[in-house]
Image (cartoon, helix red, strand yellow):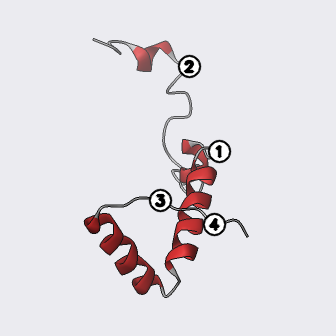
């Protein structure tokens, strides 16, 4: 596996060490997880993050975005 060197401030280094200890992983594993998380975050949409909330309201109006009555005064 290739080795990479990064420069961190003392504060950043302490933060990495603390997070790694808290998660019970090595500092290297923590950095790999962070990189993976950054990569995945770019591919997710707001809908992906809120998918468990979509459709939970049963009795609300269904045409908020298309009915001109609901759009009156929008953007003022």
**Above or below, 72 relative to 49:** above
SS under mark 3: loop
- Give me the C-alpha separation between circle 2 and circle 3: 52 Å
Identify which residue, 51 or 9, lies in the foreground: 9
- Give me the C-alpha separation between circle 1 and circle 3: 26 Å
Q: Earlier in the sequence, mark 4 or mark 1?
A: 4
Q: Are marks 3 and 4 in contact (CB under 8 Å)?
A: no
Q: Which mark is residue 43?
A: 1
Q: How many marks?
A: 4
Q: Nearer the viewer, mark 2 or mark 3?
A: 3
SS under mark 4: loop
- Give me the C-alpha separation between circle 4 and circle 1: 27 Å
Q: Earlier in the sequence, mark 1 or mark 3?
A: 3
The image quadrant that residue 43 belongs to is top right
Q: Are marks 4 and 1 in contact (CB under 8 Å)?
A: no
Q: Nearer the viewer, mark 4 or mark 2?
A: 4
| Residue drawn 39% across the image and 72% down it | 16
Q: Which residue is mark 3?
A: 6
Q: Nearer the viewer, mark 1 or mark 3?
A: 3
Q: Which residue is mark 4?
A: 3
């Amino acid at each position: 596996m290739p080795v990479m060197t990064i420069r961190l401030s003392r504060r950043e280094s302490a933060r990495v060490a603390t997070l790694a200890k808290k998660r019970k992983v090595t500092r290297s594993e923590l950095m790999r997880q962070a990189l993976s998380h950054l990569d995945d975050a770019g591919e997710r949409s707001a809908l992906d993050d809120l998918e468990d909330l979509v459709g939970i309201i049963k009795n609300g109006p269904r045409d908020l975005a298309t009915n001109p009555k609901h759009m009156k005064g929008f953007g003022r």
